[in-house]
Every structure is written in C-alpha cells, then in structure tokens.
Image: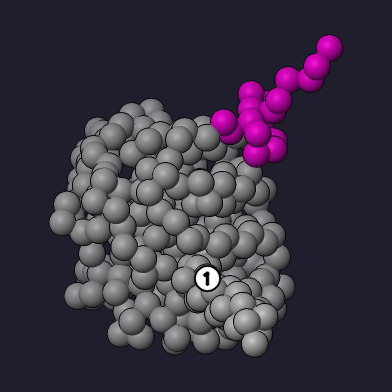
Amino acid sequence: MKHLLAIGLMLFSAASLAAEETHVLIVVGPSNHPPGSHEVAAGGRVLKHLLEHAENVSDLKVDLVEEWPSEELREKASTVVFIGDTFPANRFPHPEQNLADLSQMMNRGCGIVCIHYATGLLGQDVTKDGDHPLLRWMGGYFANRSCPHHESIARIYPEAKIEPAAIEHPVSRGWKEFVIHDEPYTNNYFGPDNNTPAANVTILATSMLPPQDPKEEAVAWCVERPDSGRGFGIVMPHFYKNWRDDDLRTFILNAVVWTAQKDVPKNGVQTSSPKLKTFDPAAVEFQPRKKK
C-alpha cells in the first residue's frame, strides 16, 4: 500500500510540475541577410538561452524550430515568438494553412511576439486595404514597400534614442532610455483609421526619427486581444551584436514573459550578457577562434 502511495505521489508531483511550466515556442523563419545582420538562427538560439537562464523567472520551457511547428508544439505553447525575414508564417510553405494553425492558437489565447523584420508583411501577404490577421494578433506591423496601402521605412541609424512610452506597463519594467546603432523601422502600420492604433493597442517605445526631420515614431507596441491573448511587436534588433544591449534585451524578454501570461518581475527579466560567439552565428567577428 505504501508503495502504491509513493508512486501516486510521484505521478502527482510530475503532473503538477508539467502544469506549472510555461511553454515558449520560438519559430525561426528564412533569412537572406548577410552575416552580422539579422542572424535569425543564432538570434533564436540566444533568445532560447536567455529565457532558460533568466535570473528571476522560472518554469520556462522553450522549444525552438526552424520550420513550421508541429501540432504538438503549437498546442502546448503559451506564446509563440517569430524571428525571420518578414512574418515567417507567410514565408514557410503552405501559408494559408499556417495562418489557420495560428488562428487556432490565437483563439485559445496564445501570445505572439515578432522581432525586427518578422513584424513585416509583403504586398502579396495583405489585401488591397492592408488587412491581415497579424494586425489584430499583434496590433500593427511593418508594411514592406511592396504593400499597396502603406509604406513603412527601413533605415539604419548610428544613434537612435529609444524611449519608454508607457512606463506603468509590465513590459516597461527594468529598462530605461537607450541609444543604439540599429535599424528601427518607422511609419509602421496600425490600421485604416488614419494609421491610428486601436484602443486595445499600447505604444511601448518611441524614437524621434529621422534625425534631420524628427517625428515621434512607434518602434515597439503591444495589444491585449478580445480572445484574452497578448501580442507584442518590436522593430529591433537588426544587428546581432545588439543582443548584448542590457535595456533592449530586458525589453524583449519582458514582452515574451508578458505574452505568455506570466508576471513580469518588478525590475524586469534579468539575464547576463550573452557570449554571442557561442551561439554559432555566421558573422566572422562572432565565430569562436580556432585552436592552433
């Protein structure tokens, strides 16, 4: 009898642990950018490492794939993070089925995060008036110049100042204004109402760009959807090296945790600066030196 009780307790403990785990699914899409910029595969590996080794957030289980995820992975994900050249769901084979799969995930309240160019859609992805499910799932998107309704702008700036725009929001915890050499997209698309964000969309960060004719531009935002899910878009980092920026890194990690419906720590998600060369990037400056 004691033996059976012990087995029962073990099974209960294992089930409880599985129930407590929060599953993050990272999907790496195709990319044709040169080494050092985007580095989406290495970037995905960095993000997985950071989430699994966060100093003040536990019980995160991270899966990373470089193809369209299986039904099993989709079903257990609390949030899905995309990184790639434009929105990967539209770049992988069978985009219509991919969007249908995502719709099922979003309808049950799964979160979604898109990083840099993964926020982007091509003209062939959207209707003539710019409609696409990503507009509702994430609150806005980067409209590639091929889009018929709107044209966002991609330009690299040596010193772009990124400023918090919603300091009371959980995603804004633990990071401050920072200056970065990167490609923060501007004139991002938020909808047909004079490009005004919907009422459930919060702008989280802005930058005064371009320097010669500055205008307040939204460079990161989030949405709380009617299906109870949460979305987040950020138009950085373009350069792989910028994963070492403490403020940008905390910002992105906060968003992943928040979209997964976990509490963001008061001082933000804390991690050590990653040793980028250990994540197998293509850029020569980040490759491990060969032993002589």
Q: Look at the image and give the residue range highlighted in magenta.
A: 275-292
Residue 197 to residue 211: above or below: below
Q: Amino acid at mark 1?
A: Leu
Asked where in the image residue 171 lies, by quadrant, the reply is: bottom left
Q: Residue at x 17, y 52 (%)?
A: 167
Compared to 100, does 21 lie above or below?
Answer: above
Q: Look at the magenta stretch and give its main secondary structure.
A: loop
Answer yes or no: is residue 254 visible. Answer: yes
Q: Single out the residue that lies furthest toward the front.
A: 1
- Name, please, the residue furthest toward the top: 292
Q: Residue at x 33, y 39 (%)?
A: 247
- Above or below, 211 against 251 in this view is above
Residue 153 at x, y percent in the picture: 39, 50
- Label 1 belongs to which residue? 17
Whether residue 205 can be seen here: no
* Residue 192, position as x, y percentages in the image: 29, 75
Secondary structure state at the residue bearing disc 1: helix
- Rendered residue at 65%/49% (across/down): 41
Which of 33 and 101 lies nearest the eye of the viewer?
A: 101
The way the protein has been coloured in the rendering is one colour
Where is residue 285? Give x, y as percent: 64, 24
User: In the displayed structure, does residue 35 sit left or right of residue 220?
Assistant: right
From the viewer's perspective, is 133 left or right of 164? right
Nearest the camera: 111 or 20?
20
- Is residue 191 within the magenta segment? no
Vertical comparison of 22 with 30: above or below: below
Where residue 140 sits, quadrant-wise, is bottom left
Q: Residue furthest right?
A: 292
**Left or right of residue 179, residue 41 in this image:** right
Quadrant (top left, top right, bottom left, bottom right) of the C terminus: top right
Q: Position of residue 255 (x, y in %)?
A: 37, 58
